Amino acid sequence: MTVTTRFAPSPTGYIHVGNLRTALFNHLIARKAGGTFILRLDDTDPERSKQEYADAIQQDLEWLGLTWDRLERQSDRLDRYAEEADRLRAAGRFYEAWETPTELDLKRKKQLNMGQPPVYDRAALKLSADDKARLRAERGQGVWRFQLDQERIEWVDGILGPLSIDAGSVSDPVLIRADGQVLYTFASVVDDIDMGITHVVRGADHVTNTATQIQIMAALGAGHPAFAHHSLLTGAQGEALSKRLGTLSLRDLRAAGVERMALLSLMARLGSSQPVVLAGSIDELAEGFDLSQFGSAPTKFDETDLFPLTARILQETPLSAVAGEIAALGVPDALAADFWAVARANITTKADLAPWWALFRDGAVPVVDDEDRAFVAAAFAMLPDPPYDGATWANWTNAVKDATGRKGKTLFMPLRKAVTGQDKGPEMADVMRLLRKKPTL
């Protein structure tokens, strides 16, 4: 059996870290098994689905290196959904219903008041042919519901373990809206069967969907994939992320300078019993990926964790990988290697390169305490004009020490702050070597 997985986003917005978790897990399962990974755009909603979002989804996945073997669009498969809907009608598993949202809401409230589960009461099954004709004339086409067998639905989940849901506690799902739009629950089933999907990993909020989809698949004469439901992400303090996910889109994280392997390495281990380890490639991530190591508890995600990982990646990045960015700053070719050697140990993201080059090229705004102003002025007077070399800092500070009697921190810190405008950073010998202008007050 060829392992086949899919990532099926709706192109109604930009994908975020929550979506990424689903995409990554399915991608790694397929890659580890040498299988097939399908990108499937769930674009059956013509009003909300936008080509710009479809393009953005592909761009984000390409940036991450999560390449797909096939691209499918549900909007190209409407005829297949119609065929399978007819099969369910013929089998007596599909029925039309006409309740308005208000009527359904009143029914739910009445059930809750009576201590009953708020599930659809199947009133539409009791309608006569005349009733249906009258409602169709009054209200137009109805919705199409799938009639569940009211029995327990059981499966072994790849993360949550053995699960069992009583179909009697679940409403018969609406699979086709009154306007003819095929809904996710049905389209996804037909696609998974036709495309030979063997494994489905998605969020824990889909557990009930999985139960109903297992029955729909059985009604269509098919078995079901191996399902696994990962935990949902929360904020660092356990707060819901739902309102913030829009600000955690992959394109926003990319714009913030997050390196792709920092993001992938974190998301491949977050919520598991395995420690987060920076991987050098997706193949390396896939080799160590183990779905059974993930738990059911809500998973805390703190985007600030991405930046130390990004900094570590940059520290190990060779000059050849950033030569274009460095050249774009205007760094002379002769200084590029020295500049990168100094800068990469002192940046969090590539955006930090520009301020460092500005410092070396133009000098910094000096930070000088009042009690050190005369000392710094005298020291600057003793500093020759550039160019400077690796010995300049030692020679200069030794001369200042002999002239002023200062030593240790009282010597070095005021000069560092005056030259760089900062109280920490690269070795000052390296700073001096890169300075293009003599520091002044």
Image (cartoon, grey):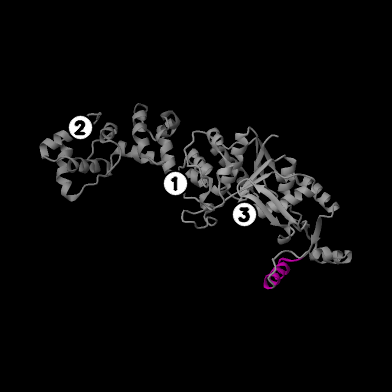
Q: Name which residue type carries label 3.
A: Asp
Disc marking residue 205: 3
Query: Which numbered disc flags the more N-terminal residue, 3 or 2?
Result: 3
Label 2 – label 1 distance at C-alpha:
38 Å
Q: Nearer the viewer, mark 2 or mark 1?
A: 1
Label 3: state its secondary structure. helix
Is residue 332 in view from this perspective?
A: no
Q: Which residues are magenta?
A: 99-113
Q: Position of residue 299 (x, y in %)?
A: 52, 51
Residue drawn at point x = 72 percent, y = 67 percent: 104
Query: Which numbered disc flags the more N-terminal residue, 1 or 3?
Result: 3
The quarter holding residue 176 reads bottom right
Answer whether residue 104 is magenta in the image.
yes
Label 3 – label 2 distance at C-alpha:
63 Å
Toward the front, the furthest residue is 162
Q: Name which residue type carries label 1.
A: Asp
In this rendering, the count of numbered labels is 3
Is there a contact, CB below 8 Å, between mark 2 and mark 1?
A: no
Q: Position of residue 26 (x, y in %)?
A: 61, 41
Query: Which numbered disc flags the more N-terminal residue, 2 or 1?
Result: 1
Question: Which quadrant is the N terminus positioned in?
Answer: top right
Specify the principal SS of the magenta part.
helix
Q: Position of residue 384 (x, y in %)?
A: 19, 32
The quarter holding residue 146 reads bottom right
Answer whether residue 134 is magenta in the image.
no
Q: Residues within 10 Å of mark 1 (few under 14, many from 20)?
A: few
Label 1 – label 3 distance at C-alpha:
25 Å
Disc marking residue 305: 1
Residue drawn at point x = 17 percent, y = 43 percent: 410
Q: Position of residue 87 (x, y in %)?
A: 83, 49
Question: Which quadrant is the C terminus positioned in?
Answer: top left
- What residue does disc 2 label? 394
